[in-house]
Amino acid sequence: MGQNLRLMMLSLEGLSVGDAFGEQFFNPANLKYLNAQALPPGEWKWTDDTHMALSIVEMLKEEGTIDPDALIKKFAYRYSKEPWRGYGWGAARLLSKIAEGGDWRELAPKLFVGGSYGNGAAMRVAPLGAFFNNDMKRIVKEARKSAMVTHAHPEGQAGAIAVALAAGLAAQEQTFKPSVFISIVAEWTQESEVKEKLLLASKISEDDFDYAVEALGTGQRVSAQDTVPFCVWVAAHCANDFEKALWKTVSAGGDLDTTCAIVGGIVSLSCKKIPTNWLDHREPLEG
Ligand code: F2R
Ligand code: MG
């Protein structure tokens, strides 16, 4: 397996473990494990975050680039097989219409006002950043193509671009100071609220966790703007510790499966491996 393919698969493992782990804490019975920082027992089911990432990975394995028309068909096919994976309202509506023959170019801009700015394009994209890690310009281009089929709103696309860039940086051999890591991601991200909040995040120190949560948001609104900057902040400050990164993420509350999917997809790359006992809990990936 080539190096970029290997990194993409590592990021997919990190994303899916994060997704499945974060999802556990929507169950009130599992809050005792959060307080004790002990892994919840049993199999952890993954959700739409992983389901959609599987289509991106499949597309890049097959073509080495994102073909938007082929990608949306893969998203719709998987959705039609397992619609119960916890899809966002807009994504579910769009993908059912695509499965009936609809065109994403017409449908995506009509979701909400100006298209979706949900965090769904960001939650699935880290493996793409890993695949193109040595080429920031290409990451921006491919991440935008992967996002626009479902997220016509510029903020939804900016969120995906920022996460893919963070994954691309994390995959590199070089290590970065957290403030530098976040600043580089911001610099390459298009003008947007996501970018403004990344610039703010670059100035928040690791000790100011409560302020980071309050100022950046943790996905309570399920938007890219309210999700991505905090995830990049955690990934930058916990680059060498997968477990610490995910416990920190989950302790902040919010959109737990998605914040953990984003952080897991990035930090798996900077750590270069995922603890086996975490992987053992995750529902097996398809195929
Ligand atoms: N929270 C969910 N899914 C909800 C359904 C769970 C249900 N209980 C079940 O189990 O089936 N998680 C998933 O949704 C998030 C990703 O969302 P995505 O793919 O971006 O979807 P959508 O619907 O396009 O956007 C999410 C919400 O954001 C708000 N929004 C988006 N654009 C907006 C706009 N232009 N104006 C106003 N609001 C906008 C809406 O509330 C959308 O529903 C992940 O958490 C994933 O795991
Ligand atoms: Mg989910």
Image: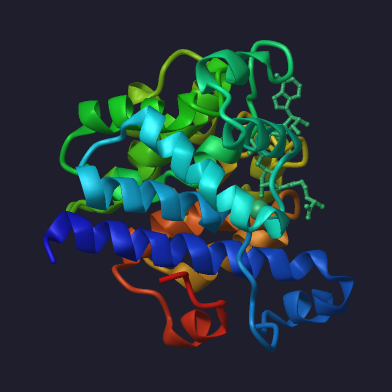
Question: Residue visible at 37% across and 42% down?
Answer: 166
Q: Is residue 239 visible?
A: no
Picture colour scheme: rainbow
Question: Residue visible at 34% across and 37% down?
Answer: 165
Q: Position of residue 38 (x, y in %)?
A: 67, 84
Depicted 203 relative to depicted 211: above or below: above
Q: Position of residue 198 (x, y in %)?
A: 50, 30
Question: Residue visible at 47% across and 35% down?
Answer: 72
The number of numbered discs placed on residues in the rendered structure image is 0
The C terminus: image quadrant: bottom left
Q: Position of residue 262 (x, y in %)?
A: 51, 51
Asked whether, in this view, residue 44 is left or right of residue 123, the answer is right
Depicted 41 relative to depicted 214: above or below: below
Q: Residue furthest front?
A: 100
Question: Residue visible at 76% across and 35% down?
Answer: 221
Depicted 121 relative to depicted 15: above or below: above
Asked whether, in this view, residue 90 is left or right of residue 258, the answer is right
